[in-house]
Amino acid sequence: MRRLQQFLAFCSALLCCVTFPGSAQQKSYAERLGWGPRDKVVIFHIDDVGMSHDSNVGTIKSMEQGLATSCSIMMPCSWVPEFFHYLQQHPQVDAGLHLTLTSEWNEYRWGPLAGKTATPGLVDKEGCLWGNVGEVVQHATADEVETEIRAQVDRAKTMGFDITHLDTHMGTVYATPEFLQRYVKVAMEEQIPVMVPAGHMQFIGADEAVRGPEARAQIQALGETLWNSGLPVLDDLYNETYGWKKEEKVDNFIATLKEMRPGLTQFIIHATEPMCNFSVITTSSNTREGDMLAMLDPRLKQAIADQHIILTTWRELKQRRDQAGK
């Protein structure tokens, strides 16, 4: 999921699968988690960990030396063990699962962890996950999606991994109401925080399709459902950095942070240190390297300090939600 527009399916799905409770919550989720009404609280979140060695290196550098605070792992990918071995030595790292139901690159691909027999609708003619979200919607059932989500959670637990949260690769779980229901169902059953922006939605709710009060109310209703189940909820999600030019990333981050409303906002990035083979996988080396370099940039670090931005993690969100109680 790389563009705001790709969240529109999510918003449409919400209209079908939740019920408006009567009134939207007034305080931001940041406030409900214990921060002040004027605080701007940010998660700089790295997607696609485990996809490649380059992705792992860029993630580690961005978190150890830079501003990135969280990441999520693509469990079906071949470089997952490398990052898990890193986590064994650095258990404090905030790492969740980037639930992966697609395999989008031409020359580097992966299949479902549950296997073809258990999830035939998720598998293409090469035995890999489908290359785009539309094909998943066309061929897979909600039962198969849930089976694969649970298989990815199970593998992480088998490896001894403390899952801090769940999110979604290419937004696939938001593509239909049925997929979304299974995503939320697993999160609530497992008591694993899940990426759903349902507060003021300054950025994610800016598109015409989700500006209306009814749509916003329904999205906020899902947030209330998650909150009442004991899980933290985001106020907003910023998902446009993939389209920024490499040389403009720092300035764009600084400007967006200034524009951002108080509350809890996650920024999605793809911090990568491209090496000799990365261009064989994808042509997105420049934007991914730009994300890594932005996380390391002194100007962005200074802007965070000057604007009194509070950086947090999904692990801290869950701890604060537990402390908040009912």
Image: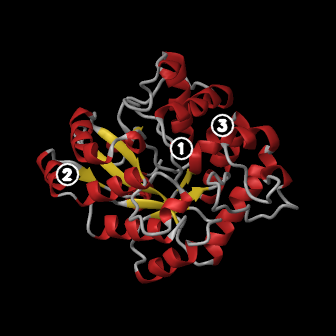
Amino acid carrying label 1: it is Met
Circle nearer the N terminus (1, 2): 1
The crowd level at tag 1 (other Cα within 10 Å; few <14, some 14-19, many 20+) is some
**Depth order, front residue of 317/289:** 289
Residue lying at 74% horizontally and 39% vertically, measured from the top left: 137
Seen in the picture, residue 165 relative to 204 is either above or below; the reply is: below
Q: Which mark is residue 305?
A: none
Q: Which mark is residue 175?
A: 3
In space, the residues marked 1 and 2 are separated at their CA atoms by 24 Å
Q: Which residue is mark 2?
A: 300
The crowd level at tag 2 (other Cα within 10 Å; few <14, some 14-19, many 20+) is many
Q: Position of residue 242 (x, y in %)?
A: 42, 44
Q: Position of residue 134 (x, y in %)?
A: 70, 37
Q: Which mark is residue 1?
A: 1
Circle nearer the N terminus (2, 3): 3
Instruction: Judge from the rendering whether residue 311 lies leftward or rightward of residue 214; answer left or right.
Output: left
Instruction: Judge from the rendering whether residue 260 lies leftward or rightward of residue 23; answer left or right.
Output: left
